[in-house]
């Protein structure tokens, strides 16, 4: 039998250093982390606090901030209302055609954002939704619908991953204790899914805040009407006002960081996407 | 009394066919068998958590084969205990009584009675995280007994415990069964457990249950 401490020629088996491996990992990771931080520093140093304050005083930008905050919050609530039942259904129930439904639920994630907007525009040209067109298309509801179509898909994925991680055994025990399916869901499953709901809501909110393509196509970019923060950045760039665009971008950076910090404070570590 | 007659059930590729056995009223029966022989599937079928293809399950003379799990009146302690991480021990013991709309005072009385019987009164405000293995076992047992079920089913309830805690749990289980007058089916592959607890030992061999 061969000696486990020797190589094929009988010489002692030598184990090389792991240092190179960790250096390679460190350099590759470091480049990406550096790029993220450098990007934020570049934004922050390109403009001055004065410009930022001036931008914040602008009526148009104030309107965009409020519309963004309100539409993102409504989108988040709607997304959770839809994502919790879909996520639970997809996690727990086997039915014919489930694989197809699963693939359909991923479409808004993989579809190019402009195509989502265009598809919504066409949907509201056709019956039976055409009668709603004048109240929706290029109006504020269009902002929320455009945000919802994409944000909800992310929330659904997160909620499904959340329910997949909760053992169905707990619901089974609740059933033997005399609970209906609904009672087992509300008494046992939903409280255990709380952290997943915070993650899904945070993700939906952050995703909605940055949504631009579908909003531009479906809701338009009318100032003081359907203008949200990404639209403002676009309009300011179009007008050649780079400082204004950066100031608004920084507002979005602050909002995104605030959401990230809040989510971390709520104990969110894994975004459950995948 | 538990009467299982010609029961057939399926779990994925695994099938149990033509299982029959009886556990007398207030008897403590231990069902033994090798890992993977279908003990858990059988227990789940009796509890109403697995569909039954053929056969009949009777509890105290009532045919429950087609009844929902919630209507069978079986206390169930699964192998992994499946405690509810967001509930306190008190809430675990009260859940079955709350869904049965017991009066608040009656719920409090029953929770106190069980907590004393199982020695977990000092744990009532705590959640499962941080409880020891033996304490978690007692909570799962209390939850299963809370609504005074006629039958108690336990799936390898002591398998994860150290030897000392296991010895303590023998007397807890026996006491609880005597106090609650509950017909018990306890699944295990541990011979010592069967020797300490069983009024009668059932064995699962070659797809059959034999005494």
Image (spheres, rainbow, N blue to C red):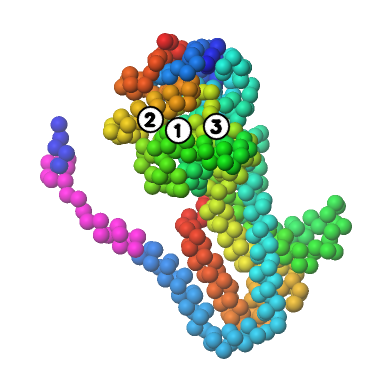
* Distance between mark 1 and mark 3 Cα atoms: 11 Å
Rendered location of residue A66, percent (x, y): 68, 73
Query: Is residue A106 visible in the rendered structure shown here?
Result: no
How would you rate the neighbour count of disc 1 (Cα within 10 Å): few for under 14, some for 14-19, many for 20 or more?
many
Q: Which residue is mark 1?
A: B141
Residue located farthest toward the right when viewing the structure as drawn: A131
Chain that bears disc 2 = B
Q: Is residue B88 left or right of residue B195?
A: right
* Distance between mark 2 and mark 1 Cα atoms: 10 Å
Indicate whether B162 appears above or below A11: above
Q: Is residue A28 left or right of residue A209?
A: left
Rendered location of residue B203, percent (x, y): 40, 14
Rendered location of residue A196, percent (x, y): 54, 52
Q: Is residue B197 left or right of residue A104?
A: left
Q: Which residue is mark 3?
A: B147
Residue A134 within the magenta-colored segment of the rendering: no
Indicate whether A244 appears above or below A133: below
Q: Earlier in the sequence, mark 2 or mark 3?
A: 3
Q: Quadrant of residue B61?
A: top right
């Amino acid at each position: 039998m061969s000696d486990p401490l020797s190589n094929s020629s009988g010489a002692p088996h030598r184990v090389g250093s792991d240092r190179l491996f960790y250096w390679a990992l460190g350099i590759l990771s470091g480049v990406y982390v550096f790029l993220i931080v450098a990007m934020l520093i570049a934004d922050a140093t390109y403009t001055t606090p004065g410009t930022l304050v001036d931008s914040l005083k602008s009526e148009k930008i104030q309107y965009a901030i409020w519309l963004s905050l309100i539409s993102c919050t409504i989108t988040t609530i709607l997304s959770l209302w839809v994502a919790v039942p879909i996520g639970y259904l997809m996690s727990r129930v086997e039915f014919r055609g489930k694989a197809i439904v699963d693939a359909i639920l991923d479409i808004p994630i993989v579809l190019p954002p402009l195509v989502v907007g265009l598809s919504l525009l066409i949907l509201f040209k056709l019956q039976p939704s055409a009668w709603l067109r004048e109240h929706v298309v290029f109006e504020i509801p269009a902002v929320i619908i455009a945000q919802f179509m994409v944000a909800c898909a992310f929330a659904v994925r997160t909620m499904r991953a959340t329910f997949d991680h909760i053992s169905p055994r707990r619901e089974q025990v609740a059933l033997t204790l005399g609970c209906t399916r609904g009672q087992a869901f509300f008494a046992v499953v939903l409280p255990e899914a709380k952290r997943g709901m915070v993650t899904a809501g945070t993700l939906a909110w952050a995703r909605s805040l940055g949504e631009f393509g579908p909003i531009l196509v479906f809701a338009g970019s009318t100032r003081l009407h359907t203008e949200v923060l990404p639209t403002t950045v676009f309009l300011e760039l179009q007008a050649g006002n780079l400082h204004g665009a950066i100031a608004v971008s920084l507002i979005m950076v602050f909002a995104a960081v605030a959401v990230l910090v809040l989510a971390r404070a709520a104990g969110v570590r894994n975004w459950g996407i995948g | 009394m538990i009467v299982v007659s010609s029961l057939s059930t399926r779990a994925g590729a695994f099938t149990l066919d033509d299982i029959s056995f009886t556990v007398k009223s207030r008897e403590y029966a231990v069902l033994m068998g090798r890992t993977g022989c279908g003990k858990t599937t059988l227990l789940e079928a009796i509890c109403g958590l697995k569909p039954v293809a053929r056969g009949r399950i009777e509890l105290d003379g009532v045919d429950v084969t087609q009844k929902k799990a919630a209507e069978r009146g079986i206390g169930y302690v699964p192998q992994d205990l499946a405690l509810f991480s967001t509930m306190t021990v008190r809430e675990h013991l009260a859940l079955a009584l709350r869904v049965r709309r017991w009066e608040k005072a009656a719920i409090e009385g029953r929770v106190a009675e069980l907590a004393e019987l199982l020695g977990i009164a000092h744990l009532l405000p705590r959640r499962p995280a941080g409880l020891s293995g033996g304490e978690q076992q007692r909570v799962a047992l209390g939850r299963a007994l809370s609504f005074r079920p006629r039958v108690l089913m336990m799936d390898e309830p002591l398998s994860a415990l150290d030897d000392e805690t296991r010895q303590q749990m023998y007397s807890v289980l026996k006491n609880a069964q005597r106090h609650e007058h509950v017909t018990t089916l306890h699944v295990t592959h541990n011979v010592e457990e069967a020797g300490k607890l069983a009024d009668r030992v059932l064995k699962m061999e070659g797809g059959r249950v034999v005494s």
